[in-house]
Amino acid sequence: MANIFIENKYNTPHDSIPFSRIRFEEYEEAMTEGMKQEDAEIERVVSNPDKPTFDNTMLTRSERLLSRTTSVFFNLLSACRTDEMEALSQKMQPLLSEHASRIAMNTRLFERIKAVHDAPGRQLTPEEQKLLDDAYEGFTRSGALLPEEEKKILAEKRRELGMLTLQFSQNELHATNAFSLHLTTEDEVSGLPESALEAAAMEAKSRGLEGWVVTLKGPSYSAFLQYADRRDLREKVYRAMATLCTSGEWNNLEIVRQIVNLRREIAGMLGFKCYADFALKERMAQDTEHVDALVEQLLESYMPKAREEVKEIEDFAREEMKAGGRDFKLEPWDLSYYSHKLRKARYDLDSEMLRPYFPLDRVKENVFSLATRLYGITFTENPDIEVYHPDVKAYEVRDADGTFLAVLYADFFPRDNKQSGAWMTSYREQWIDLETGKDIRPLVSIVLNVTKPTETKPALLTLGEVETFLHEFGHALHGIFSKVRFEGLSCTNVYWDFVELPSQFMENFVMEPEFLRSLGRHYQTGEPLPEEFITRIMKAKNFMVAYGCIRQVSFILLDMAYYTLQNPLNEDIMAFETKAWSRALLFPQLPGSCMSTRFGHIMSGGYAAGYYSYKWAEVLDADAFIVFQKEGIFNPETARRFRDCILSRGGTEHPMTLYKRFRGGEPTIEALLRRNGITTTSEKQPKTNG
């Protein structure tokens, strides 16, 4: 029977993925055949007797069977996991790691690439040069210069690391799904708004239970901590999250140690003192000193205000408690609850009072319209484009002149077989077919976990969920607008501390009154978001902003503590964590809690020694948005420049080169401090270009 991946004749709109026609056994068959085809192609290249040139040496054929198959398989593993997919991932991961290592350490291939790289007077386009430089660096960073015996050891370490990171994320998913809090009395759900009650009731009904069920999935967990009056139940839910994967069947403690040590060992074999030195060599930051400089500036600027914010909440909570309030001690499970109450008292603003004005369909329409207003592009739902789950919608994206740009999949709601959080990914990236000259357009997906519709209401978003939507949509635009020759440089294939610029840039619009006016409409009456609400939102926009910054700084400190280690990590993980981020803790570490065991960004994701990227990109996005504020936030000419200089260029040039081409100079932290209303006496500026 024909294999749909091997045959590669989808006969679908825009060659989109025919999900329903994929037989499960085709994944393994296609991945295995894909590895064979790549091996054969490499053998053809290294056996070529002609003098090495860019054209006869660089592996620029982007439409490969292996990448075609793995992109679908691993994306679905995150968004629509099944037990058989999980089992297959554990089987194939070591084989894929071994295959990648075999290519990366192929001496004959590296010698040809080195010959092209070192050739005097070579005539290459800037994009060809960047691809060549990346390939050369990639080989050296993969161990191409190591002796054969050490190459084998390095390959085994990478294979083991791949298995451990996969196990880490699967443990996190299982542990998250394993917890539920079944509530049966009105007292237990006191304080919860109607939207949270309906969602909890639906969750209970889906499990065949009466009453309400609270889980650790995003909307359920955050709403309970913010609104539940029962302090003991808030503590129970908080502790469940704080101790996730610290014991039992899905314990990640030892896996954390092994992941950190393996990364340190891999970096050491490649000549680096620590993993951070290895990772940062291909980042805008370049070295730990520049990350440290940013962290110090953030701590100095934001910590005093963050302490004030926490004290204000504790004082407010004591006043709320009245009798016996003097003995009240603010705990982590109180912060969201009382900060919400303080925000309501100070600004007369509450997430729930805004939620009816942000129905998902309306938000989606206006986010799409924002892109239309800025860039002239349009989004049209196409039911003929197949999706992988009934919740998912597929849209054709076209340029102002009608040219097809991309397919955008939108997957908004939580499921038991879906990872938590929010992300953007691609089922196919953009490139130019070198044989036909055809521009192969991308298949881009945004995946969120926002509040689901209930039996009586459509999906109604909080303002925070709107911001998350804009964030992932910014990533999507980075993919949609890509226009480069080589897949390896397209879409979001950029330095890790640059990739968050387009996403965080889009978040700025949620605090622009003109955008809010078009965005907010009551789901029942159609009435616009009241002007007084917009005024309150503007006044409250920096509420707890310093606390939020320092919380991110604490994650950066933890990340860098692990990956700047030069000796094996042997101490207790919980004790190491407490010490690592102590400078940024605003509450004492809860005994038995551990962030590391569920910190997928730096353990199983791509942010190892890179979590600082969020704040780094925030400096960039604040600095970039000033241009829009000066020239008009909807100015199409400014947007065109942002698209042409940054969004469409992928990784074809150094990111600072791209940024300066748009901005006219290098960024400083001043725009971020000004946006956040932070005043500081320090004149020091962190370096943001290395």
Image (spheres, rainbow, N blue to C red):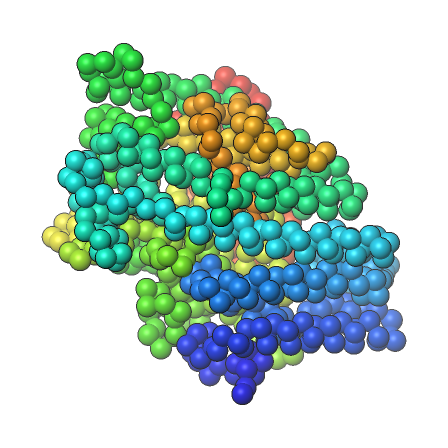
Q: Is residue 436 visible?
A: yes
Measured from the top left, where is residue 344 in percent x and y?
22, 30
Residue visible at 84% across and 55% down in the picture: 149
Nearer to the camera, 388 or 88:
88
Q: Is residue 3 left or right of residue 54?
A: left
Residue visible at 49% across and 67% down in the picture: 84
Nearer to the camera, 363 or 162:
162
Q: Is residue 97 left or right of residue 173?
A: right
In this view, 618 is above or below 137: above
In this view, 645 is above or below 433: above
Measured from the top left, where is residue 99 in percent x and y?
70, 65
Measured from the top left, where is residue 268 in percent x and y?
76, 42
Nearer to the camera, 256 or 642:
256
Residue visible at 19% across and 48% down in the picture: 211
In this view, 57 is above or below 191: below
In this view, 332 is above or below 186: above
Measured from the top left, where is residue 291 in percent x and y?
61, 33
Q: Is residue 164 left or right of residue 50?
A: left
Residue visible at 50% across and 25% down in the picture: 584
Quadrant into which the C terminus falls:
top right
Q: Is residue 657 left or right of residue 248?
A: right
Q: Residue furthest bottom?
A: 1
Q: Residue furthest top?
A: 326
Quadrant into which the N terminus falls:
bottom right
Nearer to the camera, 332 or 295:
332
